Image (cartoon, rainbow, N blue to C red):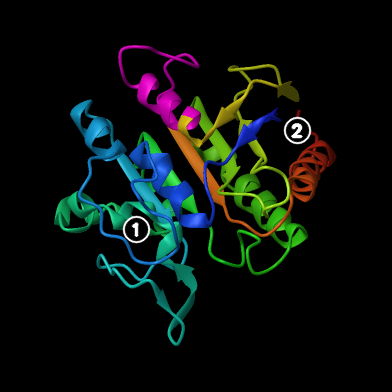
Amino acid sequence: MGRSLVNYFAVAHPSQPNYIAQIGGSTLGVTGDGVYNLPQSNLVDLMETKGVSWKTYQENYPGNCDPSAYLPATNPLYYRKHNPFISFDNIRTNAVRCAKIVNSAQLDIDLANAAFPQYSYYTPNINNDAHNTNITYAGLWLDNFLSLRLSKFPANTFVVVTWDEDDYTEANQVLTFFLDPTGSLFKQGSVDNTLYNHYSLLATIEQNWGQLFVYNNLPYVLIVLFSFGQSRSLRLKCYHFYLELDQARGVN
């Protein structure tokens, strides 16, 4: 069910610049994990120009366009630094756009009501993304998350699972893999050795709904982004662990 990109790299340290790069096309001067309010244009501008629907699902997000960096007393699992959309002024200060930053509970509601957008960006919370836990914890979460939903995604949904950065030990190489629920887009269980980074992923999304079309002009793209905390070798264990669970269930 998957294709592993074994030569994929993040673009910066620490976490937040990588998230910004994925929808901003640059780190835009972001060098840390603090609060940045950015005036630049971003992927949302391009998608809306093309009429592409979008939404970002953020686990434990407090809602109401809350700009808080961290709410340790009331909501310790959500971190703004892992939600790049809230950092852009033309999203955060636009009520219509900001309403598309939602708590992750909305995902199942949208799937049940045929309201799943063409572009979705899903950020697990600080435990589920392995940042404050470990790769076994995150692997179990990922298996549960996908096994419950893969059959519910619209036809030809292209799922991308990636990490923001490495643990400063492997030149910022990060595990990234694709999942194709229908098995029609690429050879299952394959490996891609091409050099990629977060900008490559952004370019693919831009081209998909632009003048060039890749991966059969995919109607739906879901990105699930994990956070820093483990080496790439351990993250590969997460990928193989997920595939082994798939095989045990008889999924190819």
Q: Disc 2 on helix, strand or loop?
A: loop
Residue segment shown in magenta: 200-220
The image shows residue 115, relative to residue 58, as above or below, that is: above
Marks 1 and 2: CB-CB under 8 Å? no
Name the residue: 67% across, 42% down: 171
Residue at the spot of label 1: 102
> Residue 144: horizontal and vertical position, in percent?
66, 53
Residue at the spot of label 2: 251
The image shows residue 183, relative to residue 159, as above or below, that is: above
Question: Residue 54 sits in which quadrant?
Answer: top left
| Alpha carbon distance from label 1 to label 2 | 31 Å
Name the residue: 74% across, 51% down: 231
Q: Does the magenta stretch include residue 66?
A: no
Question: Residue 193 sits in which quadrant?
Answer: top right
Q: Disc 1 on helix, strand or loop?
A: strand
> Residue 180: horizontal and vertical position, in percent?
60, 28
Is residue 170 visible in the rendered structure shown here?
A: yes
Is residue 1 visible in the rendered structure shown here?
A: no
